[in-house]
Amino acid sequence: MIKEGDRVKVRTEKETIEGVLMPSSETDIVVVKLDNGYNVGIDKHKIRNMKVVEEHKEKKGKKKEVKIKKGLPTIIILGTGGTIASKVDYTTGGVIAKFSPAELLELIPELGKIANIKTELIANMMSEDMMFSDYQKIAATVKKHADKVDGIIIGHGTDTLTHTSAALAFMLEKINIPVLLVGSQRSSDRGSSDGSINLICAAKFIVESDFAGVALCMHATSEDDKCAILSPTKTRKMHTSRRDAFKVINDGPIALVGYKTGKVEFLKKDYLKKSKDKVVIKDKFDDNVILLKTHTNMKHSLFEFLAKNYKAIVFEATGLGHLPTNLGKENLKNYETLKKFIKKGGIVAISSQCLFGRVHPNVYVNLRRLSEIGCVFCEDMLPETAFIKLAWLLSNYKKDAKKMLTENLRGEINKRIEFEEDYLE
Amino acid sequence: MIKEGDRVKVRTEKETIEGVLMPSSETDIVVVKLDNGYNVGIDKHKIRNMKVVEEHKEKKGKKKEVKIKKGLPTIIILGTGGTIASKVDYTTGGVIAKFSPAELLELIPELGKIANIKTELIANMMSEDMMFSDYQKIAATVKKHADKVDGIIIGHGTDTLTHTSAALAFMLEKINIPVLLVGSQRSSDRGSSDGSINLICAAKFIVESDFAGVALCMHATSEDDKCAILSPTKTRKMHTSRRDAFKVINDGPIALVGYKTGKVEFLKKDYLKKSKDKVVIKDKFDDNVILLKTHTNMKHSLFEFLAKNYKAIVFEATGLGHLPTNLGKENLKNYETLKKFIKKGGIVAISSQCLFGRVHPNVYVNLRRLSEIGCVFCEDMLPETAFIKLAWLLSNYKKDAKKMLTENLRGEINKRIEFEEDYLE
């Protein structure tokens, strides 16, 4: 009797496939998880032969006691879920977020040589479901530990890793230690899993450098040779599955950390340093903010809905910051709706779906028309960062929110240089 | 008396700036357009001295007559507006879309050596305002000329150039000649304008190659040395201002065209060839489709609004295709709303805001939950292309729309290879 979890060898007309038998949602399909982590579906009718190579055995948990080593710095790893905390779930054949920080430490003994590791579980979720209340929990936990440890690592799903890093960067108005967000693009049951290396590099960076503040630590290349320390407000997940998916937009990494060499190389000089300053957090967010990407043939009714139901709209506009507001019945109505919305105190912020480059309120007449009614052009700020920032500003700085949106608070804006190279070249 | 349009030299404490005096919306600011096309605002109170270098003279129009040269192929250039058709507008100091195809030809005499050029103005708009009805006008004009010319060039704003190219690629079910969309990232009054070179390369490509079908022709690099012929369905504007902003996502260009060498180098082999086949267009679109990018902390009321007001929702989801539908009150309600929406015949399509890579219905439990209720995972299709394709399919193929969404019709999907490199590496 072959059962799920068994290692099997499946022979079809064309090929022989070896891997772990997974549950299948389709009755005619056999699903096998290959050693590289990829699931392959095989038509049952095409299978000539299937045999068990190795029976599935439940691994028994044996918890090591973690000894405190004197002289080593202390790092706390906070768990929030995500792939970095995931294991293959044989009930469904997919991957769900399972996380116990102690287990994580057991999986990666190298961490124990770098620092005394503490752990705490904050949440257990895939990051697409994050709400502002989750950010608040994370910030509170960071504050609770900041004065007692040398650095904090937050394990987090990659999908909205940069939403959370931006949120944390804004919430932590004063922070005295490094707070590194770490994710994993491949789950830990895969040969190609990146989670361990990202965690080890994060720990090394905390121990070896004088950096303080929020950053990400993820694979710098598709090799396992080094990780990049990345801006919490200018970074974006730019690939669904590559391990080096995280890219700083309009800029480069803060530092590189060699995985085997352990060497930290700073590419930026002007970063915050570790200190004894008291941690200050401002952790409120306003729920009434939306991020909306524009496209062609938009209906006016959507603009009306937004103006009625939100306090602020962050547009991911086209090009230099264009909105469909100039020509045609629907588009002209959009303009009038936004004009009224702003007059009544609503905020309209404009970023670009090009992602690279910056928006500009003056180049075209159509941009000037938006500028005239009070739309705020967010320079080279990422749409997601503008969304997080505005929700945070509205709640913590009220009347100053609009003004502060275009002030560079956490490295989210590279201020325009008068003769800007990329614009002129 | 210094007047707008005059070439002036302005001296402040720190520097001397020379350029054309522009109108300024702020009374305390003098705006000067530099020779590189950039507008500089100067505080009036800081100006020591301003003098006229050259008075503005209205250029008198002198229309050349275009002689038909025997033996040369014929290309028609269709104007729709956009920067490629723009001139500095001295009334506002910005750039508006002004276009007369005859003027364009006068500006770029090189075109006349490559082919006999005809022109027709379809529209005069910046592309952010494009509606499906504009696509229909363009397709009809293409059809009208296709049998009488050797190729068609469509001048178009860059903001939604790839929305239109995708729409045209789908609408033109059969096409026998090359149809190249050409835009310009910098207006023609700038030294760095790219419009002329893009047009010249497009014309050369039409004349020198056997390619048929829809494609873009834009700068391949930030140099003026070559242009790239780009997929109409897999290309995206990835920078607000760079001339080489257009990038094929998950793939490379179809061909390169040397500007000075005139050499055409094909990088793809499997393209459609010129023929005598009859042109077939299917040009209907369904207005009830929306593209929505997800983010954290979304309100359920938006999902409800969409389910009530649209027939299909194309999500620009996070990562491998995740939606906020799993955890927490608002998110779980989103799941139920989408489930009901699909049950009643609505279509939910899923693409990724990572842009690079592909979505996947199986890797995570949360993805499987979406798959189970009938969400369609759009492989490596771009969100904008999925939006255009679905609106087109719904109207022209009704019941088959859902099935055809994941079929590769115009190169918009690179079908999954079983052992996909980027996923495994």
Image (tube, coloured by chain):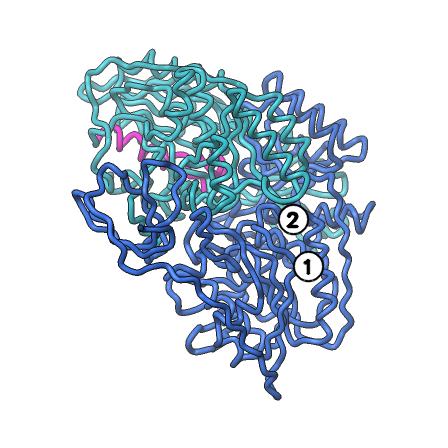
Chain colours: A blue, B cyan
Residue A88's tag is none
Q: Is residue A116 above or below residue A364?
A: below
Decide whether residue B201 is among the magenta residues. yes
- The local secondary structure at tag 2 comes to strand
Disc 1: which residue: A138
Name the spot of residue A379 as percent of width and height, x first. Answer: 62, 47
Q: Residue furthest front?
A: A1
User: Range of the magenta residues?
Assistant: B184-208
Relative side of B131 to B419, left or right: right
Q: Amino acid at mark 2?
A: Val
The residue drawn where x is 48% and y is 76% is A110
The residue drawn where x is 34% and y is 15% is B281
Query: Which quadrant holds residue A180?
Result: bottom right
Q: Are marks 1 and 2 in contact (CB under 8 Å)?
A: no
In front: B209, or B5?
B209
Q: Amino acid at mark 1?
A: Ile
Q: What chain letter is assigned to the residue under label 1?
A: A
The residue drawn where x is 62% and y is 64% is A78
- The local secondary structure at tag 1 comes to helix
The answer to whether residue B58 of the structure is visible from this angle is: no
In front: B8, or B250?
B250
C-alpha gap between disc 1 and disc 2: 54 Å
Disc 2: which residue: B10
Q: What chain letter is assigned to the residue under label 2?
A: B
Query: Which quadrant holds residue B400?
Result: top left
Name the spot of residue A414 as percent of width and height, x first. Answer: 61, 55
Q: Residues within 10 Å of mark 1 (few under 14, many from 20)?
A: many
